[in-house]
Image (spheres, grey):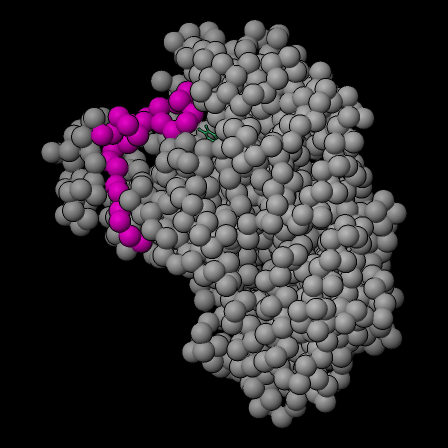
Amino acid sequence: MVEPKSLQFDDGAIAAIRAVLTARGTLALRADRRAIHVATHAEEAIRDLLALASEHHISIRSRSGPLDRRWPFRSDGEQEPLADDERTIYIDLRPWDGVVEHAVDDFVVRVRAGTAVAKLQERLALHRQWLPMDPPLAGELTIGEAVSRNEFGPYRTLHGGIREHLIGARFVPMGGGVTLKTGGMVVKAATGFDLHRLQVGALETLAIGVEFTFRLKPLPDGTRTLDRTFPSRAEAFSCAMALRERPMAPAALFVAEAPQRLPRVVVRYEGPDEAVAEAAEGAARALGMTPTASDATAHWIDAAREEWLRRTGGEKRCAVRITCRPSQIEKMTHEAARMLDSLGAQPSCFAHPGVAFADLWCSAEPDDPREWLQRLRTQMAASGGGTARMRWPLDLLSAPQGHLDRRLKEVADPQSLLNPGTVGP
Amino acid sequence: MPDFSPSRDPLVSELEQALGRDAVAASPEHLAAYECDGLALYKERPRVVILPRSTGETARAVRILNRAHVPIVPRGAGTGLSGGATPVKGGALVSLARMRRVLEVDTVDRLAHVELGLVNADLSAHTARWKLTYAPDPSSQTACTLGGNVAENSGGPHCFKHGATTLHVLGLTVVLSSGEVVSIGGPEPDPQGYDLRTLFVGSEGTLGIATEAWLRLVPKPEVVETYLAPFSSMDAACRAVSAVVAAGILPAALEMIDDRTIAAVEASIFAAGYPRDAAAVLLVELDGSRAEVRRDGTRIQEICKNHGALRFESATDEEQRKRLWKGRKGAFGAMGRIAPDLYVMDCVVPRTRLPQALAAISEIADRLGVKCANVFHAGDGNLHPNMSYDGRNAEEVRRVLQAGEEICRACVDLGGTLSGEHGIGIEKNDFLPMVFRPAELSAFQQVRRAFDPDGLMNPCKSLPSSMCGEIAAAARAPK
Ligand SMILES: Cc1cc2nc3c(=O)[nH]c(=O)nc-3n(C[C@H](O)[C@H](O)[C@H](O)COP(=O)(O)OP(=O)(O)OC[C@H]3O[C@@H](n4cnc5c(N)ncnc54)[C@H](O)[C@@H]3O)c2cc1C
């Protein structure tokens, strides 16, 4: 551990940082001239650090999970070169974990940002409940990161995104030295702005989420998973769209494509045993789907994780998430795949046709990611519409009505200190 | 006080010139019709009412109002129950009553693009031919507009399963107070930048005027079954509700009606055949595949019986099903029989706290001598204590308002909040500090400033009057 005083922050800032760390029992794990890396299990420390960052004009970068690429500290303790020359406090929220309250009979849970998704699910499963989402890397992905990056998996098809389950949050804004709270333990509310839902996908650029409250669902009684490979992407997507129209709505549905592999469609039904058996038989009869070898949830999540690891593996990469109307998903996936292909590496794709999302990635990086993204958006607009968000090498929030986003950012973080460089054109 | 009579008010002339005479109402007879919404406790006459026919006209009108620095109150059908559409002194009302078109139904993607003056029930009626429906179904759905629903984040009996309005709005076209037209989201499931939909839905007309929306439709289920379970005690009925949810069953609706409401409904044109001897009836609806409904129906029957249900009946045909719902949805109307005026309250508690909340409501009503009946969305813990009163009796009005405040306090103390679906408006703006601290309230102000830097949109609504000075005080004074 390096003492804060060895940093080249100005004296006032150093004294203030040291006071916070001492008072809140929080450790600075690494530090150099411009950066200090803090892992904290004290919410008060986050509040204090954000307050003093505003006062001394220091950038804050927060992290609560494995996916954030703006993090220069590797797990072996080494530090990658910093991209900018701001003085920055890096706050790692992973030690801030645990379930604060599980109101079992109300199907509501209050959980700290640093809690791993899988750990939360394990705890809930003891009561046959779950937070109905299956994001990749659930063992490491924390709730805070799942919210701030709007992560989801194939279960979004039936259960919706994390926004749909989030009913409250506590979050620390820049400057104020306070924790704000909106929403609560009730499953329905029309009281004040839903600032908690605003944090979904906001990449912690408006505030740092410290605690989230979710509405839960019962674990399903029965499940059946089926899959099938197809000679072409078009056939795979047309099968997926047909599955979407069948009498029982799929709980999860995805199309996976990778270089040297045939496109694969996977569908999962859940509900009363009798109903899922009927649905699975129907899908097998009508579309030639075959039951997968194992139907255990663990297997299911592993499959999703494998896809994710493949999509983020390798040194150089480019990853985008596109969304459009469901009926356009095949076309838009094709457009995005063509653009990635032109970077010189064959793309992979994980598409959720039921909810019209696709993640695409390849092992090559565009020279100018912003310009490349803009071209992709123009291409999609010309081919029928939809939106694209880059996830790698830039994590970029940018909207057509960007000025409203910017005004919101300005009122929440007037000095643009919180996770800077993320709200883009 | 300036004279805003139509012949003298230059604002009216300018609006008429820009939009045509038929888009502007300023005569006293016209204005009188817009003095309040469904919360008749508070009234204020608007300076002018504008009825645009398109987003473009709305923007044109707003630009004129902005230049003249006139406060703007958006209005749908005026069925709101928290005073959100109550005019503010010297302000203009912008009514979307003439913007009722369904612009597009995408049956493959299950989306509708609509103008927001469209009445809620008209959308589902329009999409029925494709076996698609718009899920949020406030009991006022045959009158209220989708714009009002968006602004209030309205719920309804079927929101227990499908969620309130916020989960069904994908994109919005909004006229900001500057007159600028912006798109928030679109037909895609997630936006590219911040999720501003989550701010706009439920913003009670304080961020802008929503003129168009992309809404999610849901397929009509294969099977729908409606059940009626009368109980001899409300407590037992509430426990049955919690047991149904704890058993992992997700009914489409779980609605509760108490004995006073039953008596009012059965004596009215909404008579549904609810048993008059029951202390409470639970109305349950299941939807889904035949197998799902069959299994869950049997389990719910068992749970209700184990919790002391006097009977468990299933609607035998579509007609009976509709009648059971007519009674529930007409309950507020039926209460007109008890007294000339009705104050429909709305508050919410965690579902397992319903028995305590109902006990508190009954204690408060008895102590203050207020006639109170309850009909509510039990699955969501969303209570509607309905207080019947005579508005001509000032002392009774005072007691009713006091009961309202005490009920809110009791719900908040039980871990609940001020409103589940009717919003804050001017009804509960001064109760906000029961739930939020100054830091949160000022964060709300910041959001408003980002959308409406001039502070013209529905000023002082949904904010404690201490935070907005005179206008709020004037708007709140009971007339
Ligand atoms: C008998 C009865 C039963 C009801 N049942 C329910 C129920 O089950 N569930 C429920 O949630 N509510 C219910 N309500 C309340 C009410 O119907 C809803 O709040 C409804 O959404 C209001 O719609 P409206 O068109 O009447 O809006 P209004 O009352 O005209 O306006 C309501 C608010 O929305 C704003 N607004 C209106 N249109 C727009 C727009 N286009 N852009 C921006 N802001 C706008 C207004 O400024 C105001 O703040 C009931 C009311 C009655 C009278």
Vertical order, A157 against B79 (above or below): below
Front residue of A8/B355: it is B355
> Quarter of the image containing the C terminus of chain B?
top left
The tally of labels here is 0
Q: Quadrant of ligand 1?
A: top left
Which residue is pictured at 67% across the width and 28% down the height?
Answer: B313
Q: Is residue B67 left or right of residue B77?
A: left
Residue B33 covered by magenta stretch: yes
Vertical order, A363 against B294 (above or below): below
Percent coordinates x, y for residue B260 in the rendering:
58, 14
Q: Residue furthest left?
A: B7
Is residue A96 at least partly visible in the picture?
A: no
Figure quadrant of residue A21: bottom right
Residue A360 covered by magenta stretch: no
Which residue is pictured at 44% across the width and 20% down the height?
Answer: B269
Percent coordinates x, y for residue A234 in the rendering:
59, 80
Magenta region, residue range: B30-55
Which residue is pictured at 68% across the width and 81% down the height?
Answer: A230
Q: Is residue A171 left or right of residue B341?
A: right
Which residue is pictured at 59% across the width and 74% down the height?
Answer: A238
Q: Is residue A408 left or right of residue B301?
A: left
Vertical order, B70 against A50 (above or below): above
Is residue B321 at least partly visible in the picture?
A: yes
> Quarter of the image containing the N terminus of chain B?
top left
